[in-house]
Image (cartoon, grey):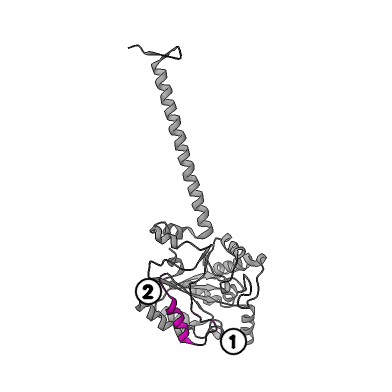
Amino acid sequence: MVPYIYKNHKIIPKIFLYNYIMIKKFAVYFIVYLLYLGLLANLFLVRKIHKKVYAPIEIKQARSLLPLRVVAELQPINGVFFHGSRHRKQIALTFDADMTQDMKNRLASGQVKSWYNHQVIDILDQTHTKATLFLTGMWIETYPSEAKILASDPLFELGNHSYSHGSFYGKCFGLKPILSIDAAGEIEKTQKLLFDITGTTNHLFRFPGGCYDTTMLKAASKLGLDVIQWDVVSGDAFGKNTKIIEQNVLGKVQNGSIIVFHLHGGPNAPHTADALPYLISKLRAEGYEFVKVTDLLI
């Protein structure tokens, strides 16, 4: 056989033509490979940004192992979590430890003996009930030893409830307004207290009174915090009737519920501990498992 061919009126050795075709094929494959690498890099970047804004890496990795129908309902609504999965019989008890300047003044003057309802913690410990505790910075400063003990208790996790428990938006239950320029400082100051005093690297934040707007949400998101609201209000704040607190919870609880109570006690939340034993017993009898907020959102 003649090792030549005619192409465009020229004599070309077959070996040259073969090499030419192979080089073209390699070039096409190489370009496709680069495009594939570029797509993977973009997906990784988007995933990394999503983790930074909405949730810590370990939570996002755990969610990636769940069925899609569960993952979809665990996404925050406009950056805020109101509940966990409706497909699992798990609920989270949360307790806010408020402390405003007025509360601190009343404590110093002796009008109030304490803004720490230790009985609530005793009941949770005795019944082996997990809970998430949102502490204000001023509360941590007032009760540093207690905050450290709470952080060391494996039943509990701590969250950020701002520094001075002011209103991050509008007329929020008469709380002192916090200017948008001061919002980040209110959050960061308590983050530092949580770390310095309790050793907690925190990723949870709850707005005082549940009041916020998009500007305040951005302030929390920039700090990499998950904003936690609730879907069940216990009504223990200024509540005068234990039975009503129990009815409020039992009448609205469902799979994935986040229930809000208060930890400071005193005249601002006098019957929280009175309602807890029955509620814990009743909810367990109905098949609910008590988990921390972080575990509820996985």
Residue at the image position 43 percent from the left and 33 percent from the top: 29
**Three-letter code, disc 1:** Val
* 3D distance between C-alphas at marks 1 and 2: 36 Å
Magenta stretch containing residue 200, yes or no? Answer: no
Left or right placement of residue 162 versus residue 91 in this view: right
- Pointer 2 local density, CA inside 10 Å: few below 14, some 14–19, many at least 20: many
Where residue 288 is drawn, which disc sits there?
2
Say what secondary structure mark 2 lies in.
loop
User: In this rendering, does residue 144 appear at all?
Assistant: yes
The residue identified by callout 1 is 112
Residue at the image position 36 percent from the left and 13 percent from the top: 3
Magenta stretch containing residue 246, yes or no? Answer: yes
Left or right placement of residue 2 versus residue 203 in this view: left
User: In this rendering, does residue 201 appear at all?
Assistant: no
Looking at this view, is 30 or 102 the one in front?
Answer: 30
Q: Which residues are magenta?
A: 232-255
- Where residue 208 appears, as percent x and y from the top left, is 58, 73
Which quarter of the rendered picture does the N terminus lie within?
A: top left
- N-terminal of the pair, mark 1 or mark 2, is 1
Where residue 283 is drawn, which disc sits there?
none
211 versus 246 height, above or below? above
Looking at this view, is 288 or 134 the one in front?
Answer: 288
Looking at this view, is 221 or 131 the one in front?
Answer: 221
- Where residue 86 appears, as percent x and y from the top left, is 41, 67
- Where residue 290 appears, as percent x and y from the top left, is 40, 73
Say what secondary structure mark 1 lies in.
loop
Residue at the image position 63 percent from the left and 72 percent from the top: 170
**Three-letter code, disc 2:** Tyr
Count of all numbered marks drawn on residues in the image = 2
Q: Quadrant of residue 74?
A: bottom left
- Where residue 226 appears, as percent x and y from the top left, is 52, 64
